[in-house]
Amino acid sequence: MTKDYDRVEQNVALSINKLKGSSLPNNLPQWLVNLGVRPGAIILKAEDIGASSPDNKTDILVTLKNSEPLKISVKKPNADYYGNWYGHIKMVNVFGKQIFDKLTVAITQWANNIKDDPTWDKKPFVGVSVNFGKRSGKTKLGFNEVFSNEDILTIAKGKGNGTNTANTLLITDHGAIDSADELISSLEELTVKNILNEIGEFDIAVRPINPMTEGSNRGKNIYTRFVPYKKLDVPTTITTMSELTKLGTYKTVSPVLSRPMLTHNFVLDDLEKNYNIIIPRKSK
């Protein structure tokens, strides 16, 4: 999460906390009533919980008296992603192994196609990570190649009914809320239609990580991995995609649910130790 997003979420929480003791409007939208939010409920507190767990889709938890809470997902108007860096554990827990297997096949096919694409910028990568949302250019797949439209809602809301699962959407670039009426009027129902209206399109964002230019992202889980045809006779440094693809191909992976996790760094270590293939890495 960026500092700008942190600031917006903090502003939302601070603004709502200034409304402690205020009552929600008596004429709430029916979709909020259907969620168990009580008309006229008193605002007790707001907590910024988005960063407390990677599984939290609720950014701001608003506790109400004698009512179900507001569990707000905060997005900026230019937000591209509704699901960042899905790891193996989360993917299997949320969607199951069958979808995982379908995803790794699609990602592997993309990787093997792009490595031979003459218009690719020739940055070497040993794996591909996954985000969900709006993506331009060649580094995306159609969401429905693997998932259903209803899965968009699962990615945006989270799974289950706990406090970590969002039930409302707030689009704001500043986070300032001056009244309970403004709070309610600013909220949107979390539906596939509303999400697509806000973001424009929803893709599988494929993230091939160039080890020479990226640091922390090398620690993300991957859904395909580069596998050499054979071990090289001597340690050899590889810096371009064309050099790398002469040595092997991309293959599907099985979910790794315990340490060591299957990450870009894991594959880079394996290539160096067991295949004499060295790809320089940016210092973190």
Image (tube, helix red, strand yellow):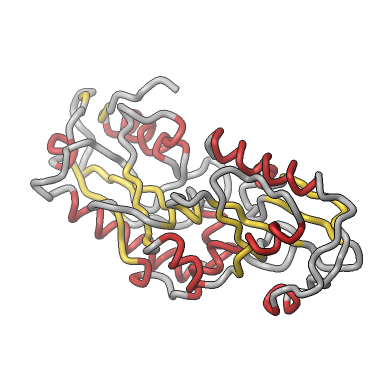
Position of residue 45 in the picture relative to residue 228 (left or right): right
Q: Residue furthest top?
A: 283
Position of residue 95 in the picture relative to residue 251 (left or right): right
Residue at 56%, 40% (x, y): give it.
5
Quarter of the image where one finds residue 174: top right
Q: How many marks?
A: 0
Of residue 73 and residue 187, the one placed in the foreground of this image is 187
Q: Position of residue 184 (x, y in %)?
A: 70, 63
Of residue 247 and residue 57, the one placed in the foreground of this image is 57
Position of residue 139 in the picture relative to residue 64 (left or right): left
Residue at 63%, 66% (x, y): give it.
159
Of residue 211 and residue 139, the one placed in the foreground of this image is 139
Residue 238 vs 85, above or below: the answer is: above
Residue at 73%, 45% (x, y): give it.
15
Of residue 8 and residue 274, the one placed in the foreground of this image is 8
Q: Position of residue 223 (x, y in %)?
A: 39, 53
Q: Residue furthest left?
A: 118
Q: Position of residue 187 (x, y in %)?
A: 64, 62
Q: Quadrant of the N terminus?
A: top right
Q: Position of residue 254 (x, y in %)?
A: 43, 57
Q: Quadrant of the C terminus?
A: top left
Residue at 18%, 28% (x, y): give it.
233
Position of residue 261 in the picture relative to residue 266 (left or right): right
